[in-house]
Image: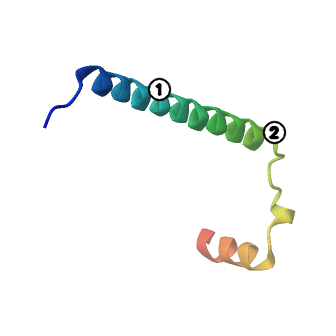
């Protein structure tokens, strides 16, 4: 079976380009997620649910 070399090269270039676009999309999404996480205020102990307060007290002592 004959495989056209130019077609193979074009196919691989398209796959590389697709992978680069996907990696860039994941990088941007990760940066946005990190920025959103950094902007959120830190949780206060009063924000915790009662079960978490109880668990924290029993484990810490």
The residue that appears at 48% across and 32% down in the rendered structure is 18
Asked if the residues shown at circle 1 and circle 2 are in contact, with their CB atoms under 8 angstroms apart, the answer is no
Q: Does dot 1 land on a helix, a strand or a loop?
A: helix
The residue at the far right in this view is 46
Say few, some or many: other residues with alpha carbon within 10 Å of mark 2 (under 14 / 14 to 19 / 20 or more): few
Looking at the image, the residue that sits furthest to the front is 1
Disc nearest the viewer among 1 and 2? 1
Query: Disc 1 marks which residue?
Result: 17
Comes first in the chain, label 1 or label 2: 1
Residue furthest out toward the left: 1
Q: With 52 as the anchor, is 21 left or right in this view?
A: left
Q: Quadrant of residue 28?
A: top right
Q: Position of residue 47 (x, y in %)?
A: 85, 64
Choose between 55 and 32: the one closer to the eye: 32
Up-down relation of residue 26 to residue 43 (above or below) = above
Q: Position of residue 29 (x, y in %)?
A: 65, 38
Residue for badge 2: 39
Location of the C terminus (image quadrant)? bottom right
Q: As drawn, is 59 to the left or to the right of 4?
A: right
Nearer to me, 24 or 46:
24
Is residue 9 toward the left or the right of residue 39 in the image?
A: left
Tell me residue 32's x, y (percent): 71, 36
Residue 40 percent coordinates (x, y) = 82, 45
Residue at (46% x, 33% y) in the render = 19
Relative to the observer, which residue lies in front, 48 or 2? Answer: 2
Q: Is residue 38 left or right of residue 14?
A: right
Q: Residues within 10 Å of mark 1 (few under 14, many from 20)?
A: few
Quadrant for the N terminus in the image: top left
**Label 2 SS:** helix
Give the number of callouts.
Answer: 2
Q: Residue at x 69, y 41 (%)?
A: 33
């Amino acid at each position: 079976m004959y495989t056209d070399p130019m077609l193979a090269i074009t196919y691989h270039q398209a796959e590389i380009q697709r992978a680069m676009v996907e990696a860039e999309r994941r990088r941007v999404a990760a940066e946005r997620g990190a920025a959103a996480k950094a902007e959120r205020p830190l949780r206060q102990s009063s924000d915790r649910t009662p079960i978490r307060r109880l668990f924290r007290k029993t484990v810490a002592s």
